[in-house]
Image (cartoon, rainbow, N blue to C red):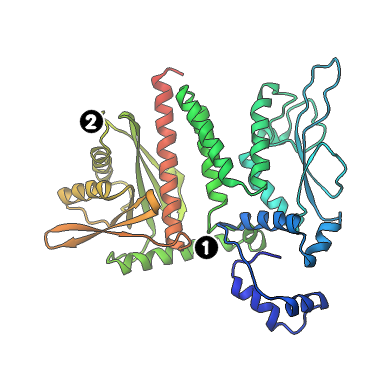
Amino acid sequence: MGKARDLKKRISSYFSNKALDSKTLKLTSEAKFIEHIIVASEIEAFLLESSLIKKYKPIYNVRLIDDKTFPHLEINPGLAKRSGTGKKPVPYVVLTRKLENKNAIYLGPYTSATDLKIVLRLLRRIFPYQSVKKHPNRRCLYSHIGLCPCIPIFPEKLPEYRKNIRNLVSFLKGDKDKVIHDLEREQKNYVRHEEFEKAGEIQRKIEKIGYITSETYNPFKYEEKPDFYFERIKAEIDSLKEILTKYGIAVNALHRIECYDISNISGKNPTGSMVVFIDGDSIKNEYRKFRIRFKKTPDDFEMMREVLRRRIKRSDWEIPNLIVIDGGRGQVSAVLQVFTEEKINIPVIGLAKRKETLIIPIRINHGVDFLEVKLPKSTPGVNLLRRIRDEAHRFAIAYHRLLRKKALNI
């Protein structure tokens, strides 16, 4: 039992390699068929492998089950309540090779302690946790960087911390969908009570989960090859050029890409965002915020027109090679209308959230029609567009939240 990005290549290696050990030779001689489970990301494959080995105890992985030297994750409910002290037990998370506490939750075994630590570093940014049995009675370094709740110093955070631990356990057991469902339900409750800041925190957790479990995100690859990031960026830009050229949009370069999004709730505090990616990477000091001035009723198309009119008046800003709109035909049509009025010739495409559909305008006689292109999420160019679109959405939401707070005099 194991995991592989390229199943054909992995299976072929068992039959083409003549220097196999006796155990693997026996495995290949007895194999009758192969079963496989498709997952969305490297992290999910890592977690699924561990849970299946523990569940089925396959004979060729039996050493992993029996040998207690393999790493496990201990989720401990915390020190028992001391009589008379009023202190409540505080959960903590540690790596261990000994399964000695019958009150703790043990996850594993894991085939690689290094990979487990990589996964935990990512998850701790989403669900901060205490990583020592006895926390000192002072604020720790991890608290300052948002990775530890420091319950001895902030006891009021204990209920929220327990939710984080429950979500962490569910995620590590492979139930990502349950975690997202619970977070979305919690978010709706905050919105219903107009606790928008807390709702925003939940949204950021959901977005981070989506990022680390995306099909193209491989955290283990980054550890093995530090320059993998730059190789990935180049592959994404080249892929996007190919996509645009295939569908009739000629671009010589994709040095600067701008993406626009509109954020409002029933027309209240409407805002627009512009994010900028240079050579495939976000350049935050080039981002711009637009407070909608002329349209206070729900009309995303007119709001988009306003934002683009104001943008093209800025001759001191560099002209982009491509403009991406967070939206479908209506939003892209609104931008094209402005560009026609102002005689602007910049390629424009849209990325609709529903099914991640690429909206590509095509000229027909004296009008415009649209192609709706659905490409695999694993396509590097699509991944670049999704990153840009998600960043524009995040930036618009952040500014919208700030305006709401000001309106409420918070």
**Residue in view at x 63 percent, y 54 percent:** 43
Comparing 410 with 318, the one in front is 410
Q: Is residue 279 visible?
A: no
Residue 79 lies in what quarter of the image?
Answer: top right
Q: Which residue is mark 2?
A: 294
Could you tell whether 304 is left or right of 183 in the image? Answer: left
Residue 300 x, y percent position in the rendering: 28, 38
Q: Which residue is mark 1?
A: 232
Could you tell whether 238 is left or right of 299 in the image? Answer: right
Disc 1 marks a residue whose amino acid type is: Arg
Q: Secondary structure at mark 1?
A: helix
* Res. 287 mark: none
Q: Is residue 161 visible?
A: yes
Crowding at label 1, few (<14), some or many (≥20) Cα neighbours within 10 Å?
some
Q: CA distance from mark 1 to mark 2?
A: 41 Å
**Residue in view at x 43 percent, y 30 percent:** 401
The quarter in which the N terminus is drawn is: bottom right
Comparing 260 with 76, the one in front is 76
Residue 228 x, y percent position in the rendering: 58, 63
